[in-house]
Image: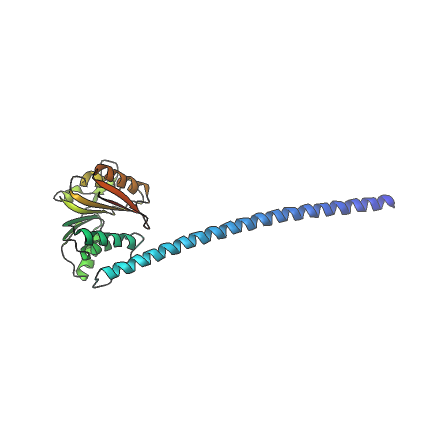
Amino acid sequence: MEMLQGALLFFVLLGVAYCARLLRSLHSKVSKSSAAMMRDIQKSSVENKKSSMIAYRQTEAFIQLTNLLDFKAAIPPTRSWAASPDLLLTIAEIIKKNKPGLVVELGSGVSTLVSAKSGARKIVSIDNSDEWGSKTVALLKEHKVRGVDVRIAPLQPYANGSEWYDVSVIKDLKKIDVLIIDGPPGSKNPEARYPALQQFIDKLSAAAIVIIDDVHREGERKLAEDFAKALPNHVLTILDHEKGTAIISPR
């Protein structure tokens, strides 16, 4: 009988030890899961706060832009593939302040309208898409804007291995006061916009200002830095815009 009781006690104690071990393991898993959940919540909270701040800043810039410029009709959506309001506001401010005789932009769209409404005397807008270029022309007509030359330049193989605009459409350009680089599409090729340096460096006026969008990307950032090096009397400023904006302007 004593042996039987001893055996039962042993198995009871063994069961208690197993349950305790199981509870410790479960507690550890729950703790790790809770910690991971808290980290995910904190990460999501930070991302949501950042996203909300970006949206607020873009809304703020858009309101300032519409107050600054006298639009006569609706304007197309901004952000995403189109220029963001913070970039558009910067373009408007630079053109209003410097009153350039010739603005050249790579990539047409709402930025073309903003440049024209800001007082640029002449604008040449280069676009590789006939469809998008036609939409820009229609937009300008709707807003009763003149003095803009939208040129369609299909992309062609370039020496650096990328594709760039047909250079024949820019041969006549010279003494450019403001150069806006927001094309061709560069999300898949970091060197897609780099040919602009070689093609335009000798076409700029002495007091030219170069504006480059998307400098949060490596390719556009390098383009901005190399543009600044090629213009020793200029200084590079990086604006913390949604996509990052580089301004290369006279010292």
Rendering coords of residue 68 (x, y %) = 23, 59
Count every numbered label the image shows and give the total.
0
Q: Residue at x 24, y 37 (%)?
A: 229
- Of residues 237 and 19, the one nearer the viewer is 237
Q: From this view, report whether residue 8 is shown above or below residue 60.
A: above
Would you identify the image quadrant in which residue 96 lies?
Answer: bottom left
Q: Residue furthest front?
A: 251
Q: Residue furthest bottom?
A: 72
In x, y percent, where is residue 153? 18, 46
Identify the residue at image location x=29%, y=39%: 222
Q: Residue furthest left?
A: 172
Q: How is the image coloured?
A: rainbow
Q: On the rendered image, what quadrant is the C terminus found in?
A: top left
Please report the residue visible at 32 percent of the width from the left and 56 percent of the height from the top.
58
Residue at (57%, 47%) from the top-left corner?
32
Instruction: From the top left corner, tell me how far across and down residue 155 is, in percent.
Output: 22, 44
Left or right placement of residue 28 versus residue 52 in this view: right
Residue 102 in sight from this viewpoint: yes
Q: In the rendered image, is residue 109 in sight?
A: no
| In the image, residue 201 above or below residue 59 | above
Q: Nearer the viewer, residue 237 or 184?
A: 237
Residue 65: image x %, image y %?
A: 26, 58
